[in-house]
Image (cartoon, rainbow, N blue to C red):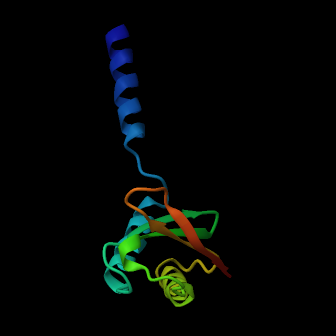
């Protein structure tokens, strides 16, 4: 009996360990859509988090592709519009970080769209 109980606990534990959150599928779909549709920079990493009918999008751009004084506002608007189209969520925060190969990443832009 103890063997079956231990086996049941192990099976249930492994199932819950690999279970995705309720928004993971939508987050992955939005990230893939952004990679395909937004062609402003190459090799950009998108991280989308959705919770409580709000979306946070973190964009990491390689430092070699960003010129000094670049205006990220059009990029952020495009990303927010894609998130709204894909998910129906209009409360979106877009953050852009410059990914430096040697030093720490640098946050250069943040804007909330409602």
Closer-to-camera residue (23/79): 79
Residue 12 image point, x, y percent: 39, 31
Residue drawn at x 37%, y 38% as measured from the top left: 15
Looking at the rendered image, the quarter that the N terminus falls into is top left
In the image, is residue 19 above or below residue 52? above
- Horizontal arrangement in the rendering, residue 29 relative to residue 111 (left or right): left
Residue drawn at x 32%, y 11% as measured from the top left: 3
Residue 87 image point, x, y percent: 51, 77
Q: Is residue 1 visible?
A: no
Residue drawn at x 40%, y 63% as measured from the top left: 25
Closer-to-camera residue (52/9): 52
In the image, is residue 107 above or below residue 16? below
Q: Is residue 73 visible?
A: yes
Residue 71 image point, x, y percent: 54, 87
Residue 28 image point, x, y percent: 39, 66
In the image, is residue 75 above or below residue 26? below
Residue drawn at x 62%, y 69% as measured from the top left: 54
């Amino acid at each position: 009996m103890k063997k079956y109980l231990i086996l049941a606990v192990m099976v249930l534990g492994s199932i819950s360990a690999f279970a995705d959150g309720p928004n993971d599928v939508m987050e992955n779909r939005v990230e893939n859509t952004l990679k395909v549709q937004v062609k402003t920079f190459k090799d950009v990493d998108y991280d989308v988090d959705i919770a409580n009918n709000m979306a946070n999008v973190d964009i990491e751009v390689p430092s070699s592709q960003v010129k000094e004084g670049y205006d990220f506002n059009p990029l952020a608007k495009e990303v927010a519009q894609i998130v709204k189209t894909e998910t129906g969520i209009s409360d979106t925060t877009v953050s852009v970080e410059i990914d430096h190969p040697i030093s720490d990443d640098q946050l250069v832009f943040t804007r909330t769209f409602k």
